[in-house]
Image (cartoon, grey):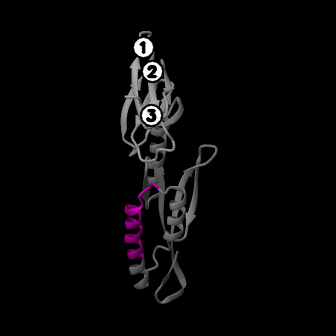
């Protein structure tokens, strides 16, 4: 977005949103958006589950400050960038490049460590587990994809653990073992 500086028709202050994401080679890549509307359109399409209210508030406060400066003829700084990325179900943002890069690397380092050994995720309406006499953990689950009324769990399988997450993203249970199997026991749990 270009904001004209009062009293100087040749000068304008740029205000952009720069979205950071991991590229195919694992490095940092970015895309810039000139307006909040174009960024919101991107978020609605690619991350509809992410709440952007706090981000929009932060953007609006800085826009108000920039408009005030431009209205007074102050063009001491000609560009402002709001950097952001999506991580852990929220949008993180900063006006400082070094600050957002630190957050980005910290998040991805932690994410990679937590997801080391990830194998697969399945959906379940209900589940239970049992330890067999052989020491192997057996996880039974039930799921009917046509039943959209029941809440869903996600069962994440790793080489050395099973993580069961609720529909809201809360971790319900963690079973730490490398000797397990997960078994589909039908659409409905028999009582």
Tell me the residue that label 3 is attached to. Answer: 188
Find out whether residue 65 is within the magenta segment: yes
Tell me the residue that label 1 is attached to. Answer: 132
On the image, the x and y values in percent for residue 120 come to 54, 33
On the image, the x and y values in percent for residue 19 come to 53, 58
Comparing 146 with 112, the one in front is: 146
Quarter of the image holding residue 126?
top left
CB under 8 Å between discs 1 and 2? yes
Q: CA distance from mark 1 to mark 3?
A: 23 Å
Could you tell which of marks 2 and 3 lies nearer the N-terminus?
Answer: 2
Q: Nearer the viewer, mark 2 or mark 3?
A: 3
Q: Which mark is residue 16?
A: none
Q: Which mark is residue 138?
A: 2
On the image, the x and y values in percent for residue 93 come to 43, 57
Could you tell which of marks 1 and 2 lies nearer the N-terminus?
Answer: 1
Comparing 1 with 52, the one in front is: 52
Quarter of the image holding residue 73?
bottom left
Q: CA distance from mark 1 to mark 2?
A: 7 Å
CB under 8 Å between discs 1 and 3? no
Name, please, the residue furthest toward the front. Answer: 191
CB under 8 Å between discs 2 and 3? no
Q: Element at badge 2?
A: strand
Which residue appears at 41% of the width and 58% of the height?
Answer: 51
Residue 137 located left or right of residue 2:
left
Q: Element at badge 3?
A: loop
Q: CA distance from mark 2 to mark 3?
A: 18 Å
Residues in magenta? Answer: 49-66
Q: How many marks?
A: 3
Label 2 neighbourhood size at 10 Å, few (<14), some (14-19), many (20+)?
some
Residue 20 located left or right of residue 61:
right
Which residue appears at 49% of the width and 42% of the height?
Answer: 108
């Amino acid at each position: 977005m270009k904001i004209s500086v009062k009293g100087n028709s040749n000068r304008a202050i740029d205000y952009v949103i720069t979205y950071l994401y991991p590229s195919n080679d694992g490095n940092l890549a970015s895309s810039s958006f000139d307006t909040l509307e174009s960024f919101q359109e991107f978020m609605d399409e690619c991350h509809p589950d992410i709440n952007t209210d706090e981000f929009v508030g932060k953007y609006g406060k800085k826009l108000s400050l920039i408009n005030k400066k431009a209205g007074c003829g102050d063009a001491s700084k000609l560009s402002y960038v709001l950097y952001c990325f999506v991580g852990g179900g929220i949008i993180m943002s900063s006006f400082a490049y070094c600050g957002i890069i630190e957050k980005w690397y910290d998040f991805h380092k932690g994410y990679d460590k937590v997801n080391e050994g990830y194998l697969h995720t399945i959906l379940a309406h209900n589940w239970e587990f049992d330890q067999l006499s052989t020491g192997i953990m057996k996880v039974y689950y039930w799921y009917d994809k046509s039943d959209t009324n029941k809440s869903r769990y996600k069962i994440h399988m790793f080489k050395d653990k099973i993580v069961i997450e609720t529909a809201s993203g809360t971790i319900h249970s963690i079973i730490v073992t490398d000797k397990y199997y997960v078994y589909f026991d039908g659409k409905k749990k028999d009582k």
